[in-house]
Image: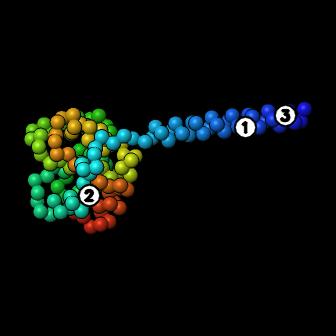
Amino acid sequence: MIRLFSIKTILILLSLLSVSLISNAQTAKSSIQNNPWTDDQLLKPEKLADMINRKENVKIYNIGVVENIKGAVNIGGASKPENLEKFRKTLKDLPKKQTIVIYCGCCPMGKCPNIRPAFNLLSAEKFTNIKLLELPDNIKIDWIDKGYPIE
């Protein structure tokens, strides 16, 4: 009897462990987001800083809840429908070939809730020169701490 109980206990524990592992794998998989941009649509911070310093014709949009980069228009978190609509209205009169840079920087890009909706909106509106500022960690580490211009 004791041996049978031990085998049952082991089987139950193995079952619980496998359910736990499957559940964790599904959770991890669901947090991975597909990126709608290509590598050539990513813009390095030093490149944008140079564009700002040379006063290039670029429209910069803060689509998060972070500090404003110099010259950026603050839209607010693009994960909120009202801010995404505000962004759509802001873009209404821009030429489709206009260089547009969006950024958030609230958190690592892989977890950011704002950059994908904003990028998808720009694509849906047929803009052809879309850039996403590459802030792998956040605005503080990847922009402010490097001394790039803010307002």
Residue 51, placed above or below residue 87: below
Per the image, label 3 sits on a secondary structure element best described as helix
**Going from the N terminus, do you reach mark 3 or mark 2 first?**
3
Residue at image x 11%, y 43%?
97
Q: Position of residue 119 (x, y in %)?
A: 26, 41
Q: Position of residue 2 (x, y in %)?
A: 89, 36
**Going from the N terminus, do you reach mark 1 or mark 3 first?**
3
Point out the image quarter for the C terminus.
bottom left
**Neighbours of disc 2 within 10 Å: few (<14), some (14-19), many (20+):** some
Q: Where is residue 105 in the image (x, y as percent from the top left)?
A: 32, 52
Point out the image quarter for the N terminus.
top right
From the image, tell me which residue sits under label 3: 5
Residue at image x 26%, y 59%?
45
Checking the image for residue 109, the label placed there is none
Residue contact at pointers 2 and 1, CB within 8 angstroms: no
Residue 43 falls in image quadrant: bottom left
- Mark 2–mark 1 distance (CA, rounded to whole Å): 49 Å
Residue at image x 11%, y 57%?
56
Per the image, label 1 sits on a secondary structure element best described as helix
Residue type indicated by callout 3: Phe
The answer to whether one can see residue 123 in this image is: yes
Residue type indicated by callout 1: Leu
Residue type indicated by callout 2: Lys
